[in-house]
Amino acid sequence: MTTITSDERTVRRVSRRLRDLCEPIASCVYFAPEAFERYQQIGLDDYAVGYFTSRGACMGRVSGEVVTATFGVFNPEIVIPAVDAGWSKTDPETVLAARQDGATAAVRRMIGEPDTARAVEILRDVMEPRSVAGRSLFAGLRSLPFPDDPIGALWRACDYVREHRGDGHIAAWVGAGVDPVEIGLLTECYWGMKPRTYIRTRGWSDEQLDAGVARLEARGLLRDDAFTDAGRELRRGIEFATDAMETRVVDALGEGADELFEILEPWTKAILDAKGYPADPAELMNRDDE
């Protein structure tokens, strides 16, 4: 079984709490009507086109293949046409401006006009010195001008946290020898979700899901759409590896963690209460703290 030292427990606890608080603030852009309205105004009428183009635009006018690689879990059969359609109608600068404007308006609607300066200061001090090596989306965000608007600044700083951890998570599951379909199936089990539900939002067909289940069963990781002991341990190990790659973030945060978390908590709660993010990450994702 995987064992955790006391230092590793601290990294897990702090990095997950940071994720839980930053994720709804950063990711409300994917659910907010304000963002979709901005995309429609520049000709991106389809949700998938707006999503893939706007999130990937921090890396420039990259191909659908590059977006597929950096996002990790999506079927290239839906990503590549969406990105091609997006670039036929807009450019990175325009879609990035729409994304930032929509996200800022959405966050402001849900949390009002609090003083975000201290939270942004802490997050920038922690995240901006982090290495971009192997972290394509985090690197893309770091390449952008930092927002002047205080609410936009909060959103961007939280997106640093989100994409830094997300890049690490992809490295962790790739390193564990699973593919995009398999990590989705394993994650449904890990989160206690009904099999073959969440993963469908990633564009995989029934045939592709059947094949993924067959591969996991052949490796002794799933049985009857449920974890085997080996499967549970593999998926937990992926999460542990993801946490471990946040060690320098946690070290940089240091004693400022409690102050930051106290500041962020009411804003995250306001976004969850406003249905700006579909579920509390702390309830959905933290299933193996012991």
Image (cartoon, rainbow, N blue to C red):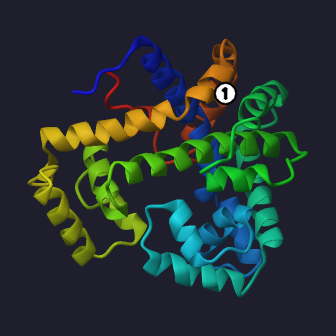
Look at 70% across and 16% down and name the residue there: 256
Instruction: Identify the residue at image location x=82%, y=71%.
Output: 94
Rendering coords of residue 99 (x, y %): 74, 61
Residue 32 vertical placement versus 52 (above, below):
above
Query: Quick check: 197 above or below 226?
Result: below
Does 267 appear above or below 105? above
Query: Can you give x and y, in whole percent of width and height, for residue 272 in the image?
Result: 55, 39
**Relative horizontal placement of residue 29, taking residue 190 as reference (left or right):** right
Quadrant of the image occupied by residue 284: top left
100 is higher (above) or lower (below) than 192: below
Which residue appears at 27% of the width and 27% of the height? 2
In the rendered view, does 71 fall on the left or right side of 73?
A: right
* Image coords of residue 187 (percent x, y): 32, 49
Spot occupied by residue 206 in the image (x, y as percentages of width and height): 24, 75
Judged left or right of residue 197, residue 90 is right
Which residue is denoted by mark 1 in the rendering? Answer: 264
The amino acid beneath tag 1 is Leu
Q: To which quarter of the image does residue 282 belong?
A: top left
* Closer-to-camera residue (79/23): 79
Left or right relative to 133: residue 61: right
**If the image is split into quadrants, where does the N terminus sit?**
top left
Q: Which element type, helix, strand or loop, lies under badge 1?
A: helix
Determine the residue located farthest toward the right in the rendered image.
148
> Between residues 221 and 119, which one lies in front from this camera angle?
221
